[in-house]
Image: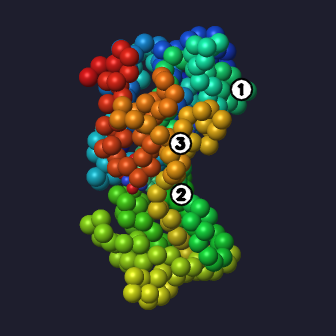
Amino acid sequence: MRKEQMSVHTLEDMPLMEDLHEGEVYDLAIVGAGLSALSLLHSGAAALGRTVVLDYQEQVGGLLRYLLPADGFEAEWELLRDFQLPAGVRLLLQTTAVGLLPASAAEPTHTLVVRRRQGTAQLRARQVVIACGGVECPREHDAIPGTRPAGVMTPVLALQLLARGYLPGRRALVYGDSRYALATARRLEEAGLEVITAAPTSGNGRSVRLCGTIQEICGFPRLSAVRLRSHDQQSVEVEADTLIYATGLLAGTHWLKGSGVSLTATGTIAVDAHYRTTIPGIYAIGAVIRPQLDHESSLRMGKEVAALLPGGVL
Ligand SMILES: Cc1cc2nc3c(=O)[nH]c(=O)nc-3n(C[C@H](O)[C@H](O)[C@H](O)COP(=O)(O)OP(=O)(O)OC[C@H]3O[C@@H](n4cnc5c(N)ncnc54)[C@H](O)[C@@H]3O)c2cc1C
């Protein structure tokens, strides 16, 4: 697929601190400018009143931005490539939500505590949509035994290296069988790496070369091999200088600690069938409620919540 120019919003669009309009009450604040948020905005944000969108990155697009364009992700690429900020929507990049104070009897609007290079500020809004996605699950999270060598990374880091013109290694084991993992494997192959794909199971119909769970990571200071154990308990040592650990995402909810927004046992935000959290006026969509969701779900959730919000359109 041809790499096309993406018309994304950059830091040049970013207002200064005084332009945060701290005293202003927004009708809607959206935390995150990734796939689900862009889908929401694309589906009728103009009708939702004064809207502010904030994201800690320098561009919109979320985690998938590093992969696109890629085969199998056509709808996502189209949304990202052609995205235009609707009139009346304020986009604040390099702006991180670090806290959420829900509305109360004393304060009828929700307050987002946000941090930027210039300092900390507060944004107030009648409705909040949390669309902050997830963080990639690292090898440390799954407590895999072995050494801690260079060369073990997540897909986004590998894709970021490629985007900057660096090869992450020469021979990579890509561990995971999601569409994202396999698209990352293809991208590495196109860049000239020798790639071996592996996953714990081959049950989802996608083909990986090896089937087994990682038993041990070997080598230091650079990765030299990964030991896999197959279902019939056979141990296989795969020589590689790079491990792309692509097992999934963890919901990005750390900043909601103490907010009163309820989480599920797996750490995702608890929502009802209408994406409502346990706090009235606060919604959640995308990977933060379903870290293993497929991409169509992110787009669909954005559209659905746009219709459910007060003033929203179908
Ligand atoms: C390792 C990996 C595995 C994946 N596995 C799958 C899979 O199995 N199947 C699949 O279909 N898709 C998968 N994905 C793709 C993808 O993550 C989601 O489908 C999609 O991007 C989710 O959309 P979203 O809007 O919820 O999150 P994102 O598109 O990631 O957007 C979230 C945005 O919120 C911003 N943000 C986060 N926290 C804050 C904060 N506190 N303040 C301000 N901004 C914030 C982020 O910068 C980001 O731009 C995977 C991705 C990775 C990296």
Give the residue displayed 35% in from the left and 76% down from the top: 209
- Quadrant in which residue 208 is drawn: bottom left
**CB contact under 8 Å: marks 1 and 2:** no
For badge 2, the amino acid type reads Cys
- Does dot 2 land on a helix, a strand or a loop? loop
Q: How many marks?
A: 3
Q: Which mark is residue 129?
A: none
Q: Visible in this render: residue 302?
A: no
Disc nearer the start of the sequence (1/3): 1
Q: CA distance from mark 3 to mark 2?
A: 18 Å
User: Image height check: is 174 above or below 120?
Assistant: below
Q: Visible in this render: residue 153?
A: yes
Give the residue displayed 58% in from the left and 13% down from the top: 108
Give the residue displayed 50% in from the left and 46% down from the top: 264
Q: Classify mark 3: residues with Cα within 10 Å, few (<14), some (14-19) or many (20+).
A: some
Q: Disc 3 vs disc 2: which is toward the camera? A: 3
Q: Nearer the viewer, residue 72 or 199?
A: 199
Which residue in the structure is indicated by mark 2?
137
User: Which quadrant, please, contains the C terminus?
Assistant: top left
Where residue 237 appears, as percent x and y from the top left, is: 50, 86
Where residue 305 appears, as percent x and y from the top left, is: 36, 29
Which residue in the structure is indicated by mark 3?
263
- Assess mark 2: CB under 8 A from ligand 1? yes
Where residue 276 appears, as percent x and y from the top left, is: 43, 30
Give the residue displayed 71% in from the left and 26% down from the top: 120
Q: Which mark is residue 120?
A: 1
**CB contact under 8 Å: marks 3 and 2:** no
User: Image height check: is 265 above or below 183?
Assistant: above
For badge 1, the amino acid type reads Thr
